[in-house]
Image: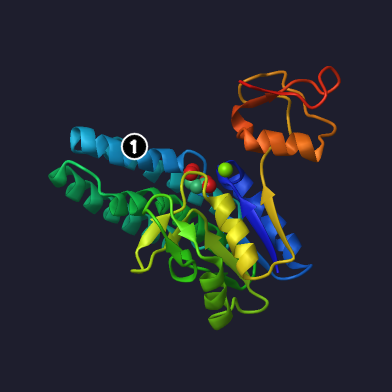
Amino acid sequence: MRVLKFGGTSLADAERFSRAADIIVSNQGQSDVSAVLSAPAKVTNILVSVVDNTVKHGEAELPLKELESLFTDLFHGLAERQPNLDTQPLFDKLTRSLGQLRQYVHGMSLLGLCPDSTYARVVSKGERLSVAAMHALLEARGYAVFDIDPVNYFAASGSYLSAEVDIEASSQRFKQSPIPEKHIGLMPGFMAGNENGELVTLGRNGSDYSAAVLAACVRAECCEIWTDVDGVYNCDPRLVPDARLLKSLSYQEAMELSYFGAKSCILKPLRQLPGSIFLA
Ligand code: ASP
Ligand code: MG
């Protein structure tokens, strides 16, 4: 089994979604594959503003409309690329998700606050829609797909918003209900289930952790985290237009970068200052 993870920027629109599907399918030729998906870019932040707007102003129509148009564009874009894709179930799912979100908004506006358990359910909606879209796309391409629901498979404990997964207990669940052979497994990242079977999240950017946990549970031969940049840059290419791709990086340097949280680090050009990192 190979585990592949695609983050939000790799699923930002129909073109990128299709490219992620191509990568999943080409890996499926080598051995069985499971893919862990994030919400499309921006979606989790929009869901966070659904909560924030509701708690502050008692309503969240603007971010809800934004979500609706973002997924509507995505589904139409996928159907253009894959004409036999039936978008009706996707739009039905989107309608149901928006309906649930409006119910949460109603509840939160009455309370004037958002309990953590509700917050977890709201902010994890994007991952589920990603999986629904990828499921439809892969089935339209003729592949058998198995949905892995992390609320059932990942046994977690701790807080609702930053839970930890028990790998031993979760591995047992995969042994009891294995991913069927010759199926592509699809799992929404970022979430798990607690001892009461309630949905919990694994913290912001938790989908990498989801992928690592899935790989450990199924004893995968590899876990690949796919991203939309060509490698490690000397600074954030979204902020610095002439950011340079580094030709090489030692393990030590990579460890230092991850230790300091790569996104907030600038690596000085290696030729001038080998191995030095500076916090931005
Ligand atoms: N979508 C979640 C987030 O933006 C989890 C993830 O993408 O890793 O934090
Ligand atoms: Mg990420």
Q: Please, which residue is most extreme toward the left here?
A: 110
| Picture residue at 61% right of the left edge, 73% below the top | 144
Q: Is residue 267 left or right of residue 97?
A: right
Which image quarter has ligand 2? Answer: top right
Q: Is residue 237 visible?
A: no
Residue 65 vertical position relative to residue 279 in the rendered view, above or below: below
Label 1 environment density (alpha carbons within 10 Å; few <14, some 14–19, many ≥20): some
Q: Is residue 86 left or right of residue 7?
A: left
On the image, the x and y values in percent for residue 241 come to: 68, 19
| Quadrant occupied by the C terminus | top right
Q: Nearer the viewer, residue 204 or 47?
A: 204
Q: How is the image coloured?
A: rainbow
Residue identifier under label 1 = 49
Dividing the picture into quadrants, the one containing residue 218 is: bottom right
On the image, the x and y values in percent for residue 231 come to: 75, 37
| Quadrant occupied by the N terminus | bottom right
| Picture residue at 37% right of the left edge, 53% below the top | 159
Q: Is residue 135 left or right of residue 197?
A: right
On the image, the x and y values in percent for residue 95 come to: 33, 55
Dividing the picture into quadrants, the one containing residue 45 is: top left
Q: Is residue 95 visible?
A: yes
On the image, the x and y values in percent for residue 40 come to: 51, 45
Q: Nearer the viewer, residue 27 or 266?
A: 266
Residue 6 vertical position relative to residue 27 in the rendered view, above or below: above
| Picture residue at 68% right of the left edge, 34% below the top | 257
| Picture residue at 18% right of the left edge, 48% below the top | 106
Q: How many numbered marks does the figure carry?
A: 1
Q: Nearer the viewer, residue 66 or 277?
A: 277
**Circle 1 SS class:** helix
Q: What residue type is disc 1 on?
A: Ser
Q: Is mark 1 within 8 Å of ligand 1?
A: no
